[in-house]
Image (cartoon, rainbow, N blue to C red):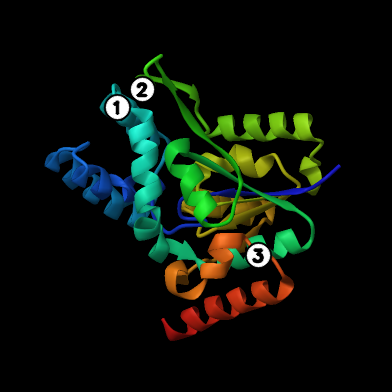
Amino acid sequence: MTAVAFFDLDKTIIAKSSTLAFTRPMFKAGLLRGSTLAKAGIAQAYYQAFGADHDQLERVKEELTSLTKGWDRAEVEALVEETVDEVVAPLVYAEALAIMAEHRGHGRRVVVLSASPEEIVKPLCRYLGIDDVIATRAAVDEEGRYTGELEVYAYGSGKADEMRRMADDEGIDLEASYAYSDSITDLPMLEAVGHPVVVNPDSELAAIAAERGWEVRRFESQVTLRDKLPAIAASGAVATGIAAVLAYWALKGRKSG
């Protein structure tokens, strides 16, 4: 059996909400109104400062499914592909990239789990050289338009369910696997593996980590992939030397901050 390193996306690999980060390109494309963009800006600022709890994420889910009902999925996918470099380049934690490279160097697959829509998560992760993704999947009608319903909601216990399903299907040893997240909403995900690691935890998760003796990490250094890591972003290179360079950038950024 193989081991996997499971990573949450928002505030674990990237410093913002992946969904909210794409609201401006969607506004420019005419998919969102100005009032919606303003609300997204406020939500992003709040998320940066305080994170998001269960009730807030449930409200986001309801609002998103209602807002996107009738949108053409292919149009959304094309928009994300066109703007992913612009949106994501400055948001990535160097520490996360270094740890992912280290896991790959030890023969572990890296899998991203996110409650954000797969139309956003998959292109974003391809940009980072990550092919294995489990994300929320919306239902579409025969014309490829969103129905306002969800087929898969990769959130809370749903993430752990998907992890166990993958483990059963692909022979993954969850006890030997790792999971990284910042949020109490991902407690089931962290509990599903033998090596849970909390990253920039919210207060509730920090308390549980202290009580259970879980490893806690602080990710602080945001790197611009466009300028510093083009080869890694394009190829997903994982050599030990590259991991060392990434770790150096992370430490350098922390010391200069």
Q: Which residue is mark 1?
A: 71
Residue lying farthest to the top in this orientation:
142
Q: Secondary structure at mark 2?
A: strand
Q: Which residue is mark 2?
A: 146
Q: Which residue is mark 3?
A: 237
**Residue pictured at 67% horizontal, 56% vertical:** 214
Toward the viewer: 156 or 68?
68
Describe residue 49's horizontal placement relative to residue 151 as left or right. left
Q: Percent position (x, y) of residue 257?
A: 41, 81
**Residue pictured at 61% horizontal, 75% vertical:** 247
Q: Secondary structure at mark 1?
A: loop
Do callouts 1 and 2 mark residues in contact (Cβ within 8 Å)? yes
How many residues crowd mark 2 within 10 Å: few (<14), some (14–19), many (20+)? many
Q: Identify the mark nearer the N-term, 1 or 3.
A: 1
Instruction: Tell me the quarter of the picture where residue 52 sits.
Output: top left
Toward the viewer: 170 or 196?
170
Quarter holding the N terminus is: top right
